[in-house]
Image (cartoon, grey):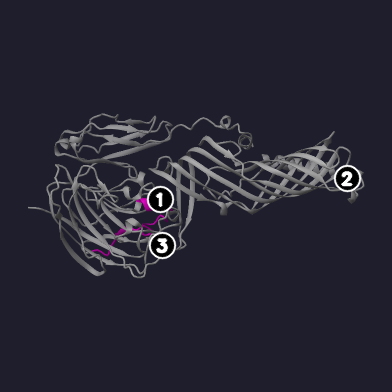
């Protein structure tokens, strides 16, 4: 009633209550000496993990990260405190919001892709959204997908409602990665997204960009020591029946195809789906040329083709990207297209 | 609480008019007939602004006319009873700045699956409400000089609903304030289909008589129930129709 009068009479500011105390408890940024890093620090806000790619020296000596927090929040241990990786305990930061009501615990994980062979045997599920993601044997997540973005579109919280998930239909071992192009939701259609391609990539998903600039949300690449020679693996693929364009109109003459490629580029900043094809940081590329249907598991072995005249810096990164619809980044493809990948390897130059 | 209050007022009114009617022989020819026109000004808003609303950046009434027919009957020199049938548009356009505004949107997917999106939005919200109703108010009244005071209840049937808008320049935290921050440039919403088909509430009116035929009127109607059912969580608080009608009435006979 009072509020009604506020609107009607225009005494609006008088009706505004005091601001609620800030309930946010984020670590917004983590600053580490750039000389200690082989890849930029990534804060996985979804899983509350700070992933660090450190030089061997920094890993041995420890680091003193400087943290930026949500306004009014406090953290333990404090920003600037030295943390060591001597294996005694996993480093964690506990952030308390200004309101005092919210507490977030961030885990610090050092990522080191030692063995560039990926069999997709171990998967974890997001606790509330239920989508799956592969993890390495040391519980570190280095692969990501578009699933965290799809989770914002009001999809049912079931592993098989998402476009990227595990399957027992693998080439080796008990499981592999299954990528299926699915129909968009009512909510995603509001922003012009009529399909979600299954995607899997070596890198991070930056949730903050998921709606603003979805292609920039997929951050590709992990630090690589040395230089790669070949990219190998196994896959099978079945294209969905009706290829549709961005407007959802079926294109009878077009057949969907899959995309599997690896890119070597100058770090320490990751590339994303907006610039992985065009960036002048790219040093070499290894791409599956035949994205057509393969009913049975098929081996591929493609060389990294190096570009002429590109400087190779001290910190290079490799990204691996797979998609069940090659044009899925433009929301074009066929619903139902299915790609299974397994046993991916990056073979170094000797 | 408010519900009980309405019940007490209504009972008292019926009891009192019943007694008066017993003393007074009803003649159908004594019913006064008026046509009314007016302009609805107000808001579909929470009774008290929650602290998640930080600033009202702009407010404007939409074209919100009220056209109706009113019948009143004098049961004594001082007391009257009446009823009306009105076509009302109740609406507003408001742009506000919100912080940690909780929303849950249920999404029906083609396969019959249901999913939900839930989160806390901070940023700019722009909402346009334009609902048309067929309103039936009933009331008792008291006359003091050239003034009539009327108090009663109304019930309204939604004819056409519109509740849409956009959120922009902000971010949503997925789930709740602990969730990850997702930046938003602009997204639209349309909750028209969720609006309740019925509205009811309190009716309070002041009328100033000018001669035999004309009245200037000021009517307030406040919805007792929120315009969205409690099962709908898209707007994180209860919105009530709270409108004042500035109008005139002309006595036909």
Q: Nearer the viewer, residue A275 or A101?
A: A275
Image disc number at residue A152: 1
Q: Nearer the viewer, residue B249 or A153?
A: B249
From where the camera sits, is residue A49 visible? yes
Callout 2: few (<14), some (14-19), or many (20+) C-alpha neighbours within 10 Å? some
Q: Residue furthest front?
A: A309
Q: Nearer the viewer, residue B140 or A230?
A: A230
- Secondary-structure class at tag 2: helix
Q: Nearer the viewer, residue A174 or A198?
A: A198
Q: Which chain letter matches label 2?
A: B
Task: Please give the range of residues in magenta.
Answer: A148-170
Residue at label 2?
B21
Image disc number at residue B166: none
- Secondary-structure class at tag 3: loop
Image disc number at residue A248: 3
- Secondary-structure class at tag 1: helix
Work out whether mark 1 precedes mark 3 in sequence or the reverse, and give the earlier one.
1
Viewed as shown, does residue B224 lie left or right of A114?
right
Q: Nearer the viewer, mark 1 or mark 3?
A: 3
Q: Is residue B183 magenta?
A: no
**Real-space Cα separation, disc 1 to disc 2, in angstroms:** 63 Å
Vertical relation: B120 (above or below) A18: below
Residue A2 figure quarter = top right
């Amino acid at each position: 009633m009072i509020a009604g009068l506020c609107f009607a009479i225009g005494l609006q500011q008088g009706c505004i209550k005091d601001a609620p105390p800030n309930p946010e408890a984020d670590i917004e940024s983590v600053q580490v000496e750039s000389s200690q890093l082989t890849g930029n620090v990534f804060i996985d806000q979804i899983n509350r993990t700070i992933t660090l790619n450190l030089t061997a020296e920094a890993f041995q000596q420890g680091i003193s990260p400087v943290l930026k927090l949500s306004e009014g929040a406090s953290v333990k241990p404090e920003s600037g405190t030295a943390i060591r990786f001597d294996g005694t305990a996993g480093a964690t930061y506990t952030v308390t919001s200004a309101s005092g009501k919210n507490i977030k615990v961030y885990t610090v994980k050092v990522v080191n892709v030692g063995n560039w062979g990926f069999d997709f045997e171990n998967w974890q599920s997001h606790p509330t959204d239920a989508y799956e993601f592969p993890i390495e044997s040391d519980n570190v997540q280095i692969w990501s997908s578009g699933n965290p973005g799809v989770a914002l579109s009001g999809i049912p919280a079931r592993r098989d409602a998402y476009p990227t998930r595990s399957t027992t239909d693998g080439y080796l071992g008990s499981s592999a990665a299954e990528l299926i192009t699915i129909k968009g939701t009512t909510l995603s259609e509001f922003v012009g997204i009529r399909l979600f391609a299954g995607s899997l990539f070596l890198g991070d998903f930056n949730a903050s960009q998921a709606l603003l600039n979805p292609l920039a949300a997929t951050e590709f690449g992990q630090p690589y020591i040395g230089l790669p020679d070949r990219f190998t693996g196994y896959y099978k693929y079945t294209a969905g029946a009706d290829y549709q364009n961005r407007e959802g109109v079926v294109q009878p003459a077009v057949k969907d195809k899959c995309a599997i490629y690896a890119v070597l580029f100058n770090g320490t900043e990751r590339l994303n789906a907006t610039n992985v094809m065009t960036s002048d940081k790219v040093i070499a590329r290894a791409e599956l040329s035949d994205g057509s249907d393969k009913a049975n598991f098929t081996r591929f072995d493609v060389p990294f083709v190096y570009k002429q005249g590109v400087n190779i810096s001290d910190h290079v990164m490799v990204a691996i990207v797979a998609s069940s619809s090659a044009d899925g980044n433009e929301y074009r493809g066929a619903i139902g297209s299915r790609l299974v990948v397994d046993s991916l390897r990056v073979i170094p130059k000797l | 609480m408010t519900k009980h209050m309405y019940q007490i007022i209504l009972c008292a009114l019926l009891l009192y008019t019943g007694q008066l009617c017993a003393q007074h022989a009803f003649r159908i020819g004594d019913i006064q007939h008026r046509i009314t026109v007016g302009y609805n000004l107000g808001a579909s808003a929470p009774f008290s602004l929650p602290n998640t609303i930080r600033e009202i950046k702009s407010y404007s009434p939409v074209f919100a006319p009220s056209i109706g027919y009113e019948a009143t009957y004098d049961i004594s020199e001082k007391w009257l009873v009446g009823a009306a049938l009105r076509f009302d548009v109740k609406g507003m356009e408001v742009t506000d700045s919100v912080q940690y505004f909780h929303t849950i949107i249920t999404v029906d997917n083609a396969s019959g699956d249901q999913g939900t999106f839930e989160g806390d939005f901070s940023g700019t919200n722009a909402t346009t409400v334009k609902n048309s109703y067929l309103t039936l108010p009933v009331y008792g009244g008291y006359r003091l000089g050239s003034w009539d005071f009327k108090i009663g209840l109304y019930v309204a049937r939604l004819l056409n609903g519109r509740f849409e808008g956009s959120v922009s320049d902000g971010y949503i935290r997925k789930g709740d304030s602990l969730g990850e921050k997702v930046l938003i440039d602009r997204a639209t919403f349309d909750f028209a289909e969720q609006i309740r088909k019925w509205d009811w509430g309190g009716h309070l009116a002041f009328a100033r008589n000018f001669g035999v035929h004309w009245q200037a009127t000021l009517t307030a109607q406040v919805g007792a129930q929120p315009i969205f059912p409690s099962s709908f969580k898209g707007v994180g608080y209860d919105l009530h129709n709270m409108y004042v009608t500035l109008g005139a009435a002309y006595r036909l006979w």
